[in-house]
Image: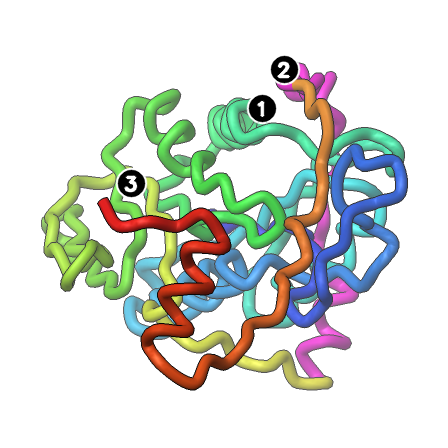
Amino acid sequence: MRPSAARAVDFAVKIRVNPQQTGIDTNVKHSMNPFDEIAVEEAVRLRERLKTEVKSIQAVTIGSPKSIDTLRTALAMGADSAIHVEIPESDPAPEPLAVAKTLKAIIEKQKEGIDIVILGKQAIDDDLGLTGQMLAGLLNWPQATFASKVEVDVAKREVVVVREIDGGGEEIRCKLPLVITTDLRLNVPRYATLPNIMKAKKKPVTKYSAADLGVDLTPQLETLKVTEPPTRVGGGKVESVDELVAKLKEAGITAV
């Protein structure tokens, strides 16, 4: 079982555009992407339910040397080992297709087969929500996105997943191997205890470069400019409907 553990700007940080207007300011606190944290938690819960049927849990991240802290968090939550595809601090964040190709290369490199890959449905910094779907396409595996409930039938090698959709939930049945992306309602991640944080320091972390995996992480898209939304203008109060209509007319708003 392989959950993702991406490093992203911490959810409590107010996002600001950098002075160059090439992206967001990344000189702020980072932590594990919340949706990936849910993915790690679900992998651990599946092992708690299925016991020895889950042979191992391996967390994966692609990022700068600082991303090791994110992997240590995943290991403290219950992952057995981790893989770090290291890129220079100055390199731009890899795009979803490059991430999917990297994960595919890692999966194909494993001697023991992988049955389930669990990813967050999206990263909270770019909100693209594409990697899981692309990975499933590249592997030619079934996919269950926006999962709010996961039930595995080991004997039948099937997984029943309830997906979050507009207006409710959709229950689907998939064959293993499978790619799952997590939604908020799937679980509430646990806090890593101090003993587990200490144990995580001794768990193995395998490092690869993009060249080791035969993938190219060079961005294919160019960001021309990033700007903050315009400042909202304060509203005003009117004493009557006539005054409201007059102000609308002044603003150039007329009835159709």
Q: Nearer the viewer, mark 2 or mark 3?
A: 2
Q: Nearer the viewer, mark 3 or mark 1?
A: 1
- The Cα atoms of the two marked residues, 3 and 1, are separated by 20 Å
Q: Position of residue 170 (x, y in %)?
A: 12, 55
Q: Position of residue 2 (x, y in %)?
A: 47, 47
- The Cα atoms of the two marked residues, 2 and 3, are separated by 28 Å
Which of the labelled discs sits on residue 81, or is there none?
A: none
* Residue toward you, 89 or 78: 89
Residue pointed to by mark 1: 98
Question: Where, by quadrant of the figure, is residue 65 drawn?
Answer: top right
Residue pointed to by mark 2: 220
Q: Earlier in the sequence, mark 3 or mark 1?
A: 1
The residue depicted at 22 percent of the width and 44 percent of the height is 256
State the SS at label 2. Answer: loop
Q: Is 79 left, or right, of 154 in this rendering?
A: right
Per the rendered image, the range of residues in magenta is 195-221
Q: Amino acid at mark 1?
A: Ala
State the SS at label 3. Answer: strand
User: Mark 2 and mark 1 in contact (Cβ < 8 Å)?
Assistant: yes
* Residue toward you, 8 or 58: 8
Question: Where, by quadrant of the figure, is residue 64 drawn?
Answer: top right
Q: Amino acid at mark 2?
A: Gln
Q: Nearer the viewer, mark 1 or mark 2?
A: 2
Which of the labelled discs sits on residue 178, or is there none?
A: 3
State the SS at label 1. Answer: helix
Magenta residue check for 197: yes
